[in-house]
Amino acid sequence: MVKIHEMLLDQDAANVPGLSMTPKYITVHNTSNPSKGADAEMHAKYQRNGSGGRQASWHYTVDDTEIWQSLKDNQQGWHAGDGGGPGNTQSIGIEICENADGDFNQAVKNAQWLIKKLMDEHDIPLENVVTHKHWSGKNCPRLLLDSWDEFKEGISDNVDKKEDKPSKPSKPSKPKSKSISQMADEVIAGKHGTGHEARRKSLGISKSEYEKVRAEVNRRLGVSTPKPKPKPKKSISQMATEIIQGKHGNGHETRRKSLGISKAKYAQVRAEVNKRADSGTPSKSISQMASEVIAGKHGNGHEQRRKSLGIDKATYEKVRAEVNKLMK
């Protein structure tokens, strides 16, 4: 169970419709904000502080440790991009955080748990769990679109755990498999036709198993087995970027094994990650100041925020543009 905190928006605020609804859908988003510290609480504060002057509001924000609720389930939000369509007027909006200092995979699991809970509470079927792209065509949730079916299967698995299903009848045991040597004999004897794929299917074995048979055949016939082409190597910069994006999990040894590199090479990657993390000192970058504005550290109103940051108007316009870009 994930702890759900409340920071509910005033229904008279400019960034909420102020209308009630009966939820029939659940719409999933990514925050598109990989900045460090851009967690669920920060995005809840961003909404409470007026969403940067945008008409933007959603119900829940989920990160790897907790969930923050900004709208009640029966209140409409502005998150689906379909105006007065069912995305805004009949769906609960869930934003999944992708901050670089969080565990995105755990945030996804927490979101699946929340979705299952809301489905049970509001009798929403799994087919009504949809993407932001479903309503407006926007490329969102950008980190889940390519694996959307697997994401929904994760929700379905959670639902199925509550149901008692009859066990499947056991499959009949397979006959004892042949040895590599026996299969090589049969291939040489021509019992499995021509062509590698035809032979593999005739033998009824996996591709990796067939490669062993093929190597044995070639060994006997004095033919060398061609080595697979090595995968193109990633640069230190590319691997550092992937680690910052959370693509290789947590912990140095886990990341090194996921990248498939030596300890010496990983030390270079780690140094590059640390260099980027420290590159913002001593002065703050536009990205850092934008993250602070989103977190509500500089109050409300553009002039107040600019003075609090201690920057000129031209620089503040860059910060403001970055805030709007991050929160789209």
Image (cartoon, helix red, strand yellow):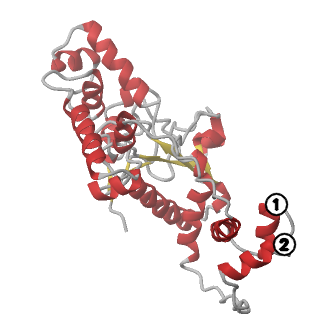
Q: Is residue 251 visible?
A: no
| Amino acid type shown at disc 1 | Gly
Element at badge 2? loop
Total marks placed: 2
| Amino acid type shown at disc 2 | His
In this view, 81 is above or below 128: above
- Mark sitting on residue 195: 1
Element at badge 1? loop
- Of 196 and 64, the residue lying toward us: 196
Measure the C-alpha gap from mark 1 to mark 2: 9 Å
x, y percent for residue 207: 67, 65
- Mark sitting on residue 192: 2
x, y percent for residue 270: 26, 43
In this view, 168 is above or below 154: below
Query: Which residue is at a point 31% across and 57% down the rendered structure image?
Result: 65
- Of 161 and 250, the residue lying toward us: 250
- Of 189 and 64, the residue lying toward us: 189
In this view, 279 is above or below 20: above
Query: Which residue is at a point 72% across and 89% down the rendered structure image?
Result: 174
From the viewer's perspective, is 310 left or right of 10? left
